[in-house]
Amino acid sequence: MKIVTILGARPQFIKAAPVSRALRRTHVEILVHTGQHYDAMMSDVFFSELGIPAPDITLNVGSAPHGAQTGRMLEGIETVLLREQPDAVLVYGDTNSTLAGALAAAKLCIPIVHVEAGLRSFVRDMPEEINRVLTDRLSTLCCCPSETAREHLAAEGITGGVTVVGDVMLDALTDTAARVANDPARLTALGVEPSRYLLATVHRAANTDDVVRLRAIIGALGAAAEPVLWPMHPRTQHILAREGIALPANIRSVEPFGYLDLVTALQHARAAVTDSGGLQKEAYWLGVPCVTLRDETEWTETVASGWNVLADADADRILAGVRGAGPSGAARDAYGIVGAAERVVAAMEQRFE
């Protein structure tokens, strides 16, 4: 098979690492980077650390409003697909790159594989929800991370070309956690003590662009009365500077982490506070209690298990979640076992060969 893979944001780089390795053993992959995340610490470092081949094509789309960004991606991806004539297009998750790749392929009648299909937050004013719903509708092969995701698709009438493969991020996390476990100096370099700090990440526009919400989140972290390590997204850095918001003394802001440092920081944290979908799962797998700065999540299994608490931007709920101990010993197997990448490739071979 000849596969064109569309990537654009750091969570997709992580997911693509194990799948690209499995795919390239016997097939041809053309890697297209839309440039949705273009900063070196948001993009390049992930390719080097995770051993992902350098992109064959980079579109350099950069930042723009949703419509303009998706339109530029659609135009660039269409040109690539017309030239490469692949057997299928592979997309991940729920970003604008995902939707643009699916739209371009659908209009050219090229089969689409959606990894992480069937996720739903049921919040239609969330851009990621629109992207994932439309991509699932267009896809030829929907690779679901869990049985819950498959049930979501069935409820929408999507039953053909659906398979539960597990979560490819578990493959990437398992490999990376083993690597950093043999590198104790990495934690020392982060300047924190094991289990004596919180790890915070805040990047979603709903939290960063709403100053009232952002101040409430910062206030709650400041009131936590323990060190907070915050690798700060460029969007958040810009807004703090623009609004003149000072961080409390217990919060240490650092530049965005590569994946090795992120996994190191997360597995040794007492708890995580985040609005990232990926970090919710990684905390769940590593047995780290998580407080999610949203009022909903597509990763409902993490909440049902007790490892994840939805706190939105409510300072009292954030603090209550942070101070909770988490469900020690509770099962963390909702997204299958290692080997999802191989199962994705096997499903593609069965479907397209």
Image: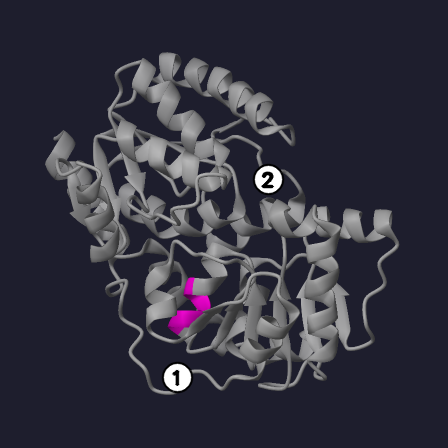
Q: Is residue 168 left or right of residue 310?
A: left
* Model colouring: one colour
Q: Please tell me in which quadrant of the rendered image residue 275 appears.
A: bottom right
* Image point (29%, 78%), residue name: 331
Q: Main secondary structure of the magenta part?
A: helix
* Image point (37%, 12%), residue name: 82
Residue 83, disc = none
Amino acid type, callout 1 = Pro
- Which quadrant of the rendered structure holds the C terminus? top left
Assess whether residue 284 is covered by the magenta stretch: yes
In the displayed structure, 267 sits above or below 76; it is below
Q: For the residue labelled by badge 2, is the local secondary structure a helix, a strand or a loop?
A: loop
Assess whether residue 289 is covered by the magenta stretch: no
Relative image position of residue 137 (x, y in whole percent): 27, 30
Label 2 – label 1 distance at C-alpha: 35 Å
Residue 315 visible to the viewer: yes
* Image point (60%, 49%), residue name: 204
- Choose between 249 and 316: the one closer to the eye: 316
- Which quadrant of the rendered structure holds the N terminus? top left
Amino acid type, callout 2 = His
Relative image position of residue 256 (x, y in whole percent): 67, 56
* Image point (83%, 76%), residue name: 249
Instruction: Using a 10 Å C-alpha cutoff, classify the residue at mark 2 as few (fewer than 14 neighbours), some (14 to 19) or many (20 or more).
Output: some
Read off the residue under disc 1.
327
Read off the residue under disc 2.
37
Q: Which residues are magenta?
A: 281-285
Q: For the residue labelled by badge 1, is the local secondary structure a helix, a strand or a loop?
A: loop
